[in-house]
Image: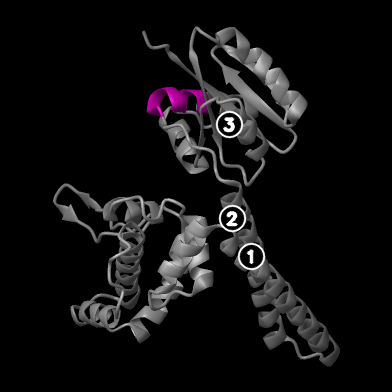
Amino acid sequence: MSLPIVYVGADVSKASVDFRLQNQCFNIPNNASGFSRLRTRLAHLEGKALVHVVCEATGGYQNALVDFLHDHSIPLSVINPRQVRDFARSRGILAKTDRLDAQVLADYGAANTPAAQAPEPPHMRRLAALLTGRDHLVASRAQEKTRLQQCEDSWLRAQIKRSIAFFDREIKKLEVQLLELRDSDPVLKANVERLDQVTGLDWRGALSLIGSMPELGTLNRRSVAKLAGLAPLNYDSGQFRGQRRIAGGRAPVRRILYLASLNAIRFNRIFMDFYLKLRAKGKAGKVALTAVARKLLVLLNSALKNPNLSLAN
């Protein structure tokens, strides 16, 4: 006889975690001592029910709790905050407090029965952290370059140039760490080299794509496009037939693919012809480029699934 599943909502903040366990609400510190208290709280359910913790992605504040739960073999799901907020609105819940959010997370788990997530390999977590750090440095450098174009004061221009040189050095240092991390794992290195064979994507883009979408190579073409937010969605009502559009998905993946698509339509004959064909049919440039990005993603996904697939232009 299978045990019932009890979904536990966990609203995580920097300093503490609010829980909803059945009809109980309690708060613990977001640290090892707090997690020990959580373990004591859950002990009375052992042998009576299976505990499944549901929390939101909170920019890294949830990592300590996630590690603790994995270490103690407690199933958990980390949910996109937008999905949880939409669920709350569907229930008519517009207010927002930590305890109320914990209740919503518990209800979300009971209503949607999300799959338990497997532990993330340490090298993939570090890859994500390094990529986030690089994105911040690149964005800061771009801001300084914009300031340089707008600045007329000679002393300030010299300072801005020093700032740009600083970001250049730090980006290079971080990229050395990325390359060392890539080379430390044979599977990661093989996947990056495989994606790097596709025109339009270099090793940086390949690493960023794998770090932002670890599922690449394990999904079918429709699922991978939907996960990236590149699947065209219908916009119809009654007799009205609207233009299909993309929505949701992972913005970092779309950004990587957008930049890769710009190179692909210039240097890859297949993608160039595909883009020009869409433009000849009257498709807007951004619409055609989005279609190229989706086609490129499907190719990259297939390349990892099938090592024998030819990637020639």
**Relative to 312, is 296 above or below?**
above
Magenta stretch: includes residue 111: yes
Determine if residue 263 is in view. Answer: yes
**Mark carried by residue 125:** none
Magenta-tinted stretch: 105-113
What colouring style does the render use? one colour
Camera-nearest label, 2 or 1: 1
Q: Could you say where residue 230 lies in the image, as x and y percent from the top left?
A: 35, 59
**Residue at mark 2 to residue at mark 1: CA–CA distance:** 14 Å
> What residue sits 29% from the left and 65% below the top?
308
Which quarter of the rendered picture does the C terminus lie within? bottom left
For label 2, the residue is 128
Circle 1 residue: 180
Dot 3 or dot 1, earlier in sequence = 3
Amino acid under disc 3 = His
Q: Earlier in the sequence, mark 2 or mark 1?
A: 2
Q: Position of residue 221 (x, y in %)?
A: 28, 56
Dot 2 or dot 3: first in sequence order is 3
The residue located at (18%, 78%) in the rendering is 281
CA neighbours of label 1 inside 10 A, class few (<14), some (14 to 19), many (20+): few
As for residue 199 lying within the magenta part, the answer is no
**Rendered position, 96 above or below 165:** above
